[in-house]
Each structure stands twice: as C-alpha cells, then as structure tokens.
Image: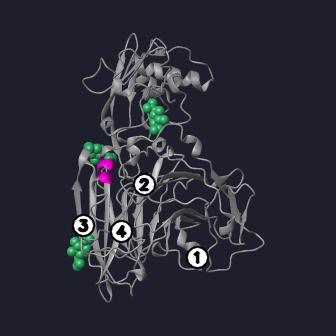
C-alpha cells in the first residue's frame, strides 16, 4: 500500500481496512469483526431466475469481515418484521418468517470461493422460485455499532411452451408456416430461419395472458423449392431458447375431400439445452359433423398445458394389468425371455430393412376396458434405451402382412428414435421432445373414451394423450428397436390394483391434476365423433 493513502485518509473505517489487508497479507487470522464499520454491497443489475429454479441474490459486506456474529435480515420492502430470512445469534430465526418463504430461503454463496458468513457473504438463496417472488429484496446487516442495507431486484423468467409449427400449402410452391408458443416471461424474441437466412415474418403478434405470461403468434410464407425446412425460435436470452422446425418437402396440399382437416403437417423438433417440461396443446384435427372420420384416425392429441401439471398416476394404476408377451406373434428377429416379459432385438438375426419386428401382448382389450401397463426402457450400465415402439395394435394386424404401421392399419404407438426424439406413428409426422427420454413409460388405455396416454413415470408427466378411432380388439404392442439390443422389460402393474376403481377412473383423458386441463379434457370428449 502506498503510504500516501494513510496520510490522506485518517477516517477510522479506512484505517481498519488497511489493517485488515495488512493482517490478511501476513496470513494472520482476523478473529472478530463485530466492532467494525461496514456497508452492504449488491450487484447493480437485477438478478434473474427461472420459474421453479434457484435464485441467488448476492449481498456481501465491505470491507470483507466475519458476519457470523452479526444479524442478517432479508426482507421485502415494508415487510421488515416478516422477513424472508432472519439470521441472528448465530442461527436462522424461523419464528417471524413470512410463510411463503418457509423452507425455501437460506444463506447461500455469492460465488463458490466465498467463505459464506465467515467471509462476509450474506447472499440469499431461494429455491423453487414462483412468479410472486419477483421484486425487490432488502439485505440488512447489523452489528452492535453499525448497520447497512442494500436492495437486490429479482426478475423471474419463464420459458414457455415449445413452438408449435403448422404448415399448410397455399399453392404449388408456397407454404404458409405458422408458429405459436405460450407462457413466456419476459417477452421472447421470435425468429424465423430457413437454415441459410433469417426470414421476415408476414405477421408477428404478442399477447399477454394470465400472470402476465406472453404468447407469440407468427406466420411466414415459404417456398419448399428454395428451402427444405424452416425453423421458428423463441429466445429469452442466450442459452434460453427453443426451436421448432417444419419439413416443407412433406407438406401435402390440403385434401379437398376432408375439408375439416385443416392442418397438413406439424413437426416439432426441439433443440433444448436443459431439461424441459413439455406443455401445450400440440395438435388438433377437428372434423366438422359432415366430415367422414376414417377408421383408426387420430381425433386429437394433447400434451401438458402447464409445466407444473402432473398426471394422476395413482388413479391410472388402479387399472394396472400384467402384460405378457405373446410368443406366437413374435417374429424370429426378436429375442423373448422365457417369462414373456423381456424382449430385445436379436443380434444374430437382424430384421431386414423395411420390415418391422414387433410383438403383441397375450391379452387384448375391448369395449369397457381400462388398462394401464409400464415398460422399463433403461438398464443399469446400458443406459436409457433410444429406439423402441410402445403402444397398441388392433388384433387384425396378426393377419395382415408387413403393412405400413399406420393408424388406419391398426397401429397406434409412441416411438423413440435415436436422434429424432419421440414420435407418434401418424401421418402427418409429429415429433415430441425426448428430453428427458423416459426410463419407465406408462401406457394408459380407456377404450370407450378412445384415449391412449403415454406417461413418463419417473417425473409423473404426461408425454402425450391421443384420441383415436380404435378398431376392434386392441393388444399392447412392443418393438424393441431395430439394432438396439438393449432390452425392454414389461413391469407387472397389476399389483397397483389394490383399491377398487373409483368413479373418476371412468372420466376421459389423462387425469391431469390441474383443473384447466381437466376441463379441457372432459369438454369435447364425445360430440365430435
Ligand atoms: C421444491 O420443489 C421440489 C420439486 O418440485 C420439491 O420436491 C421440494 O419439496 C420443493 N421444496 C420446497 C422447499 O418447497
Ligand atoms: C426486470 O424486470 C423489470 C420489471 O419487470 C424490467 O423492467 C427489467 O427490464 C427486467 N430486467 C431484466 C434484466 O430482465
Ligand atoms: C397463414 O396462416 C395464418 C394462420 O396460421 C393465417 O392467419 C394467415 O391468413 C395465413 N396466410 C395466408 C396467406 O394464407
């Protein structure tokens, strides 16, 4: 330290700072700091945290000193007496804490190398951030001789639904691609690209909904002959973005005969950096009364509407069954264990390209059936299986040769492909995000409501619910994936059936817990068939 500083500043605080530095430089342990003067320092910019994640609101003492013996109080403005966090007499005081912060707030670290209270770091850590947590937080630190305060502003951000893209051919070389995404905060940037350049949208609208969450709607006209695909991305900040893509080459002209079926192709492909909960109504084909609905046809598809929505899996499990594989339906390309529960692709006898190696369950379901079963798709040491089909097949598939696995041929299933994610076997193609890929997949069937739901059992989330015009007796369908020798194992779900099936089990849909979804599910169940 240059001596001139000492001469110029004779104030006690700076003198103290000097001594602390000097002592620290000598490696002398500074024991107690309670008699020192200090101020609270906080970052200049607002802190932001994602809904449901952890918020860290930094605050530290300058000069750096031990705060273990001090009082630390974090409070919302005007709520000094009901703090977010109160530390005093060397422990957290819970008595007067504001109820919505109980169990969620603690003292955290401003940075990993900080020594916490010992180093004067009084940072607030808040877990499971909610929308109401947005706003100002006051950091207040007091000793016997001095106190300091400073404010940190917390912004809560919400990543909305993955963009839903739909494409409709308007004429020979023009496709109208629209993109919709809901539930963002703050307003995301929406950008279109065809891989070579950004496209200027013909229209881009934002609207605000519940809790100030923002929806974005946009469309562009694009030409398949100039670019094979277009993407729509929503961007909050770097790394906080979601992208959907649509492949323009597969967009069929809107069929004239089925006038009510408006959407030609929807493809969702996601580039997600972190795990994401999939939300939102994905796709809806709605026939008007006069439209002829084809056998096997998909009536509608939906996924989670809110990130918080959980599936009432307990209720579905009441319909638990013990599925056994029917060896008679197994092609030689599959290896099935003697218990009829484990199937894998045969290493020595691979399925020829173009053919499908699937196997059905022994027991079929007809009108009046509710059924639920689970399939394990991971294995210790091997990891999560990446290629599979799980779903239903009509009994008629046993008689037909190798036909395309489409709904009209009696196949309704969810599949997983190594790179592409999860897919429903429907024309047009639909891709679902595979992040995380299910380790245990739950399958729920309500035959009379024409409902087939797929659940990621581990996190209790709906992957997708399909309503389809099922044909005849339905059998569980399994395909362990060509070239993927990791096994798929059927778990016995019949032991969940301890309670009698409650009334609610006859309701349609996926038993979404949220009311919003429940309303949605029950509304149009019958009238559009
Ligand atoms: C935070 O959320 C997780 C997962 O939703 C939950 O398990 C945990 O109990 C919550 N913690 C608090 C303190 O609310
Ligand atoms: C934080 O939120 C405030 C108020 O909503 C807003 O004005 C500000 O731009 C936000 N800041 C950041 C960095 O998001
Ligand atoms: C493109 O589709 C949107 C709906 O997604 C519609 O509002 C718009 O009018 C369409 N534009 C053309 C030129 O067809």
Q: CA distance from mark 2 to mark 4?
A: 15 Å
Q: Earlier in the sequence, mark 2 or mark 4?
A: 4
Residue marked by disc 2: 278
Near mark 3 (Cα within 10 A), the count class, few <14, some 14-19 or many ≥20, is some
Residue 282 screen position, x and y as percent: 37, 62
Q: Which residue is mark 1?
A: 399
Task: Determine which residue is flagged by label 4.
Answer: 165
Q: Earlier in the sequence, mark 1 or mark 2?
A: 2
Q: Residues within 10 Å of mark 1 (few under 14, many from 20)?
A: few
Which numbered disc covers residue 528? none
Label 3 to label 1, Cα distance in Å? 51 Å
Q: Tell me the element at label 2.
A: loop
Q: Nearer the viewer, mark 4 or mark 3?
A: 4
Q: Is residue 400 rendered to the left or right of residue 512?
A: right
Looking at this view, is 494 or 311 the one in front? 494
Residue behind label 1 places its C-beta within 8 angstroms of ligand 3: no
- Residue extending farthest to the bottom is 172
Pointer 3 residue? 204
Q: Earlier in the sequence, mark 3 or mark 1?
A: 3
What stretch of residues is rendered in magenta?
Answer: 516-522
Left or right position of 177 against 240: left
Rounded to the nearest angstrom, the CA distance separating label 1 from label 4 is: 37 Å
The image position of residue 63, as x and y in percent, is 45, 25
Judge from the rendering whether residue 13 lies leftward or rightward of residue 213; answer left or right.
right
Q: Quadrant of residue 292?
A: bottom left
Whichever of labels 4 and 3 marks the residue nearer the N terminus, that label is 4
């Amino acid at each position: 330290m240059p001596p001139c500083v000492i001469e110029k500043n004779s104030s006690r605080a700076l003198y103290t700072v000097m001594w602390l530095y000097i002592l620290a430089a000598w490696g002398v342990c500074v024991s107690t700091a309670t008699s020192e003067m200090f101020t609270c320092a906080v970052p200049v910019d607002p802190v932001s945290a994602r809904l449901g994640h952890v918020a860290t609101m930094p605050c530290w003492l300058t000069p750096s000193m031990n705060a273990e013996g001090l009082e630390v109080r974090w409070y919302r403005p005007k709520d000094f007496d009901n703090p977010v966090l109160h530390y005093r007499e060397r422990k957290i005081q819970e008595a007067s804490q504001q109820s919505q912060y109980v169990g969620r707030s603690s003292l955290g670290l401003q940075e990993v190398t900080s020594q916490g209270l010992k180093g004067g770091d009084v940072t607030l850590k808040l877990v499971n951030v909610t929308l109401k947590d947005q706003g100002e937080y006051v950091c207040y630190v007091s000793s016997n001789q001095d106190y300091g305060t400073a404010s940190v502003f917390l912004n809560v951000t919400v990543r909305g639904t993955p963009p839903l893209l739909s494409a409709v051919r308007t004429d020979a070389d023009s496709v109208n691609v629209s993109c919709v995404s809901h539930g963002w905060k703050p307003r995301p940037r929406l950008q279109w690209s065809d891989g070579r350049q950004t496209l200027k949208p013909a229209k881009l609208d934002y609207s605000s909904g519940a809790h100030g969450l923002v929806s974005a709607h946009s469309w562009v006209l694009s030409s398949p002959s100039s670019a094979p695909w277009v993407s729509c991305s929503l961007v909050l900040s770097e790394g906080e973005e979601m992208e959907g893509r649509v492949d323009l080459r597969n967009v069929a002209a809107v069929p004239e005969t089925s006038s009510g079926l408006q959407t030609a192709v929807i493809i969702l492909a996601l580039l997600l950096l972190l795990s994401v909960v999939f939300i939102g109504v994905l796709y809806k084909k709605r026939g008007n009364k006069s439209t002829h609905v084809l056998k096997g046809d998909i009536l509608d598809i939906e996924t989670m509407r809110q990130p918080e929505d959980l599936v009432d899996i307990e209720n579905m499990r009441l319909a638990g069954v013990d599925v056994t594989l029917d060896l008679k339906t197994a092609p030689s390309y599959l290896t099935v264990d003697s218990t009829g529960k484990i199937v894998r692709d045969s290493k020595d006898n691979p399925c020829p390209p173009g053919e499908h190696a699937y196997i059905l369950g022994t027991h079929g379901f007809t009108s009046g059936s509710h059924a639920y079963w689970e399939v394990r798709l991971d294995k210790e040491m091997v990891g999560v299986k990446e290629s599979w089909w799980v779903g239903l097949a009509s009994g008629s598939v046993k008689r037909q040769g190798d036909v395309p696995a489409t709904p009209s041929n009696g196949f309704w299933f969810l599949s997983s492909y190594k790179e592409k994610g999860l897919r429903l076997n429907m024309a047009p193609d639909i891709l679902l995000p595979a992040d995380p890929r299910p380790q245990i997949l739950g399958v729920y069937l309500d035959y009379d409501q024409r409902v087939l739901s797929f659940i990621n059992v581990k996190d209790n989330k709906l992957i997708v619910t399909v309503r389809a015009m099922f044909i005849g007796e339905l059998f569980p369908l399994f395909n362990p994936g060509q070239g993927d020798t990791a096994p798929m194992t059927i778990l016995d779900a019949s032991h969940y059936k301890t309670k009698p099936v409650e009334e609610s089990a006859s309701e349609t849909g996926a038993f979404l817990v949220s009311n919003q979804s429940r309303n949605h599910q029950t509304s149009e169940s019958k009238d559009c068939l």
